[in-house]
Image (spheres, grey):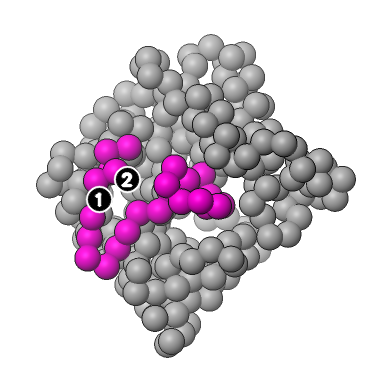
């Protein structure tokens, strides 16, 4: 195996995946949006945040489900918690099957260089009900993480073993989490409700994802949500101001060509 040590090579692989996902979504009428750090990078830097090394995409739940069930490519595949046993994450990734990437959380799980695909779900318009759902979601994800982690992800060893030994399977937890976060009836508010999603303040108006607009990223044109400014402001606050130097941290990765 040949090790991938240059962040620019890693980004080149990710951009190729993004190109393929973009083409697939365009061909099949699926909405997707550059999001999170990738969207901040697009708006503030015209591409990657200089110290960043991943790509994030949001999809409305309906488009997300269609995508993970139908996306096919010669050297890429979708992995997601609904179909992958012992999958640590709570959202989908599109991985390059010609590569291997090691992360601390998933050392026992085969994964390649990837981009992240997050579903966006309707949430209650009632702030109090929303708080209740977020509290329960946080607990369920904590239990799930303890059951799948290779080492203790919590500050407390006692809590870790209590959660890990609860007589409930990860498959059952996934079903409970889905019932909690997937609302079939539309509301006026949406959020990324996965474990990697924002805090309660990151909920934003559903009209923000009603349609797409073009956005430049690394000298190419992709799509983001029409209400991207409100989404970024609610989720990150003053997203145009650079963070302190000590917070400009690149993720550690180990990756290889197979």
Which quadrant of the structure image shows residue 212? top left
Q: Please tell me which residue is depicted at 37% across the width and 62% down the height of the picture.
A: 95
Per the rendering, the mark at residue 71 is: 1
* Residue at x 44% of width, y 61% of height: 54
Q: Which quarter of the figure is the C terminus placed in? A: bottom left
| Whether residue 228 can be seen here | yes
Q: Is residue 169 magenta?
A: no
Residue identified by numbered label 2 = 68
Identify the secondary structure beneath mark 2: helix
Q: Residue at x 53, y 12 (%)?
A: 126
Give the residue displayed 41% in from the left and 67% down from the top.
113
- Horizontal relation, residue 247 to residue 67: left or right: right
Report the magenta residues as a range.
65-91
From the image, which quarter does the N terminus lie in?
bottom left
Q: Secondary structure at mark 1?
A: loop
Q: Main secondary structure of the magenta part?
A: loop
- Residue 56 % position (x, y): 40, 52
């Amino acid at each position: 195996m040949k090790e991938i040590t240059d962040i620019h090579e890693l980004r080149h692989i990710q951009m190729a995946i993004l190109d393929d996902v973009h083409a697939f979504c365009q061909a099949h009428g699926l909405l997707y949006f550059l999001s999170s750090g990738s969207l901040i990078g697009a708006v503030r830097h015209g591409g990657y945040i200089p110290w960043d090394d991943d790509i994030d995409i949001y999809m409305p739940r309906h488009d997300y489900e269609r995508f993970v069930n139908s996306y096919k490519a010669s050297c890429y595949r979708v992995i997601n918690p609904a179909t992958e046993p012992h999958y640590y994450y709570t959202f989908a990734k599109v991985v390059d099957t010609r590569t291997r990437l090691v992360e601390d959380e998933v050392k026992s799980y085969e994964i390649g260089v990837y981009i992240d695909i997050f579903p966006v779900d309707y949430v209650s318009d009632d702030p109090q009900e929303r708080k209740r759902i977020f509290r329960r979601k946080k607990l369920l994800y904590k239990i799930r993480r303890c059951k799948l982690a290779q080492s203790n992800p919590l500050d407390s060893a006692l809590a870790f073993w209590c959660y890990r030994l609860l007589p409930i399977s990860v498959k059952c937890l996934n079903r409970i989490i889905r019932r909690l976060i997937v609302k079939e009836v539309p509301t006026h508010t949406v959020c990324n409700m996965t474990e990697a999603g924002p805090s309660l303040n990151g909920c934003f108006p559903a009209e923000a994802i009603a349609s797409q607009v073009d956005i430049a990223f690394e000298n190419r044109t992709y799509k983001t949500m029409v209400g991207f400014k409100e989404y970024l402001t609610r989720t990150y606050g003053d997203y145009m101001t650079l963070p302190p130097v000590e917070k400009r941290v690149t993720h550690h990765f180990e990756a290889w060509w197979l």
